[in-house]
Image (tube, rainbow, N blue to C red):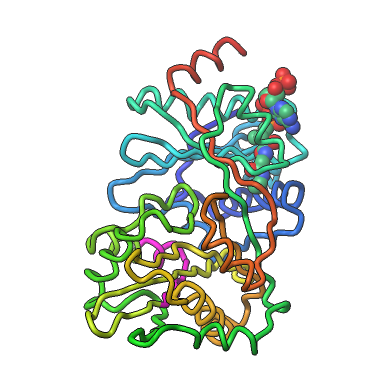
Amino acid sequence: MVREWDPRTAPSVEIEAVLSSLNAAVAADLPDDPPWRIDSFREYLAVTMPGERRICWIAEAAPGATHRGEPLLGTANVLLLGEIGVIEVIVPPAARHQGIGRELLSAVANRAYAEGFTSLGVEAIGDTPAVGFYERYGFQCAFVEIRNILRLATVDWLNLGEMAAGVGSGYRIEYYPGGPPEELYEAYAEAKAAGRDSYEATDLELRPSSYDPDRLRSSLATLHARGMRPHIVVGLHEPSGKIAGLTEVVVAAQHPTRADQYDTVVVPAHRGYGLGRAIKARMLFELRSAEPRVTEVQTWNAFENEPLLKVNSELGFQPDRQWCEYDAEVADLVRRLEKDN
Ligand SMILES: CC(C)(COP(=O)(O)OP(=O)(O)OC[C@H]1O[C@@H](n2cnc3c(N)ncnc32)[C@H](O)[C@@H]1OP(=O)(O)O)[C@@H](O)C(=O)NCCC(=O)NCCS
């Protein structure tokens, strides 16, 4: 039985069941990933950027089964942003191949259709059942990225120190835990906009990036409210006072040992001076002291982003697996799911 579910008001036992279901899927599909923790997990599910909405569903064997301590059969959610909805469907291994994924996807698709959304996107992780599942329902791969992981235990800190210092004259590197200071918002947003093509992809739901100061402010507030702590390193171009490069890493309370790399941008006019390498190297030093629990950093890169791939491999990032963005037209999806019923 699938029912709509609100993480803001759900009893704790249901929040815990959603977490267990997620962790059972992680253990099966991404066995090297750390399990998620309950810390701020409700907020992670409940809080969105202003103007965005997340609608969630859970699948139970019978009404109230979760309250009797039975495991959930699956969860789904759609984040409605602007024109598109970004979805997630997770069925724990013990409940797979019984049509629950299809039922959850139908709930999402019907709701998106009723609300007038035209397309849905999803991140399907390579070498997991999600790829076959979404392709079965007509989703098409729009974009492929590689997840890369850096294990801090493998870092050559001496060499990294040289990278952090190896930047052309006229640049100063600064670290800001929690986010850039208010007076830099304008310059920061401007640098992000100027470096659009060189961004290091964050997950689908956190795009579009914060290209204006108000959106940046909301984005930082949303991260904090979801239990996610941003760390920022910027390269300041001293003669102009502009931000020439920036890199962002977020440490989530839900998986505090595995940090997430968000955007890395070097503004085109400042490329070729060692800035990308220096800001990313400096970030690792800062993380090591500010977040001692972090043992790994993960990042997602497009194949064609060669300069960033080169910097990442110099730092010691290792390719992990493909992450594929799929999308589907809602009307088409609803038709296919009905036919399959
Ligand atoms: C993808 C997922 C939602 C499918 O859930 P499910 O309940 O097993 O799917 P269903 O039983 O409804 O399957 C519906 C159809 O999808 C397709 N499908 C499902 N699993 C598949 C697989 N492993 N390979 C290929 N096709 C598959 C089949 O065509 C199936 O229909 P059929 O059984 O009549 O052949 C589930 O495997 C899942 O949660 N995976 C998580 C993946 C993930 O994101 N992991 C990483 C983060 S936790």
Residue 72 visible somewhere in the drawing: no
Quadrant location, the C terminus: top right
In percent of the image, x 35 and y 60: which residue is there?
Answer: 195
Q: Is residue 75 above or below residue 278?
A: above
Q: Nearer the viewer, residue 69 or 292?
A: 292
Figure quadrant of residue 266: bottom left
Please state the horizontal and vertical placement of residue 75, each as a whole percent of the image: 58, 40
Does 223 appear in magenta?
A: yes
Please state the horizontal and vertical placement of residue 140, each as a whole percent of the image: 55, 28
In percent of the image, x 76 and y 47: which residue is there?
Answer: 28
Q: Nearer the viewer, residue 176 or 97?
A: 176
Outermost front residue: 272
Q: Is residue 122 above or below residue 271?
A: above
Does 256 appear in magenta?
A: no
Which region is colored magenta? 222-233
In percent of the image, x 43 and y 58: which residue is there?
Answer: 199
